[in-house]
Amino acid sequence: MAIKIGDKAPDFTLHSFTPSAELADFTLSSYLGKKNVLLMFFPQAFTGVCTEEMCSVTDKFDELSGNDTEVLGISVDGTFVQKAFAKQNNIKYPLLSDFNKEVIKKYDVVQETFAHGMKNTSQRAVILVGKDGIVKYVEVTENPGVQVNFEKIKEAVNNL
């Protein structure tokens, strides 16, 4: 069932090498009562639209991370791939590896077929979780080649 505004965001813990060189765990519930969390799901590192999206997040980071909001990128790429992707594109926010595809299933953002026959990557999706753990904004693009609406995301963050 698709996640929607007003739902309690499913908790998760994922690994990341970014933005530090040390492997770290990121747990959504650790932000409860402290920060809002902007989850930026993307299909695959090093692909055209995903690179554009993650670099746009970097360019708009101050706007998107306003109002006490943490930005977390999530894909099914492994941690080593994400580390190289972040380094090549100067991405400073955490990219979390959902290699085992548990979180994309919890959030119902599975892209059944991506490119070149690859199955079960993440859809391009944005989910804004408030400090209270409740979903405040949802955007899912059915076509992975379609970019998210950064103006609407910024508006949602500013309205928290």
Image (spheres, rainbow, N blue to C red):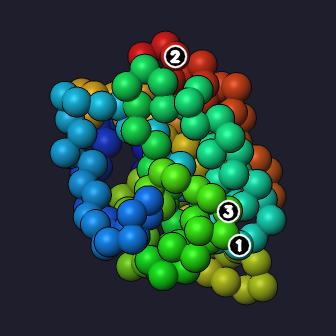
Q: Position of residue 76 (x, y in %)?
A: 50, 73
Residue appearing at x 67%, y 83% in the figure = 118
Amino acid type shown at disc 2:
Asn
Quarter holding the C terminus is top left
* Depth order, front residue of 123/86: 86
- Residue at label 2? 158
| Circle 2/circle 3 CB separation < 8 Å | no
- The answer to whether residue 132 is visible is yes
* Kind of residue at badge 1: Phe
Image side of residue 75 versus residue 130, left or right: right
Distance between mark 1 and mark 3 Cα atoms: 9 Å
Q: Nearer the viewer, mark 2 or mark 3?
A: 3
- Circle 3 — which element? helix
Q: CA distance from mark 2 to mark 3?
A: 26 Å
Give the label on residue 89, or none: 3
For label 1, the residue is 46
Do labels 1 and 2 touch, CB within 8 Å? no
Q: Position of residue 45 (x, y in %)?
A: 64, 71
Among the two numbered marks 1 and 2 on one chain, the one whose residue lies closer to the N terminus = 1
Residue found 51% across the figure and 73% down from its top: 83
Looking at the image, residue 158 sits to the left or right of residue 70; the answer is: right
Secondary structure beneath disc 1? loop
Q: Residues within 10 Å of mark 1 (few under 14, many from 20)?
A: some
- Cα distance, mark 1 to mark 2? 30 Å
Q: Earlier in the sequence, mark 1 or mark 3?
A: 1
Q: Position of residue 74 (x, y in %)?
A: 48, 60
Residue 68 vertical placement versus 88 (above, below): above
The vertical placement of 90 against 62, above or below, is below
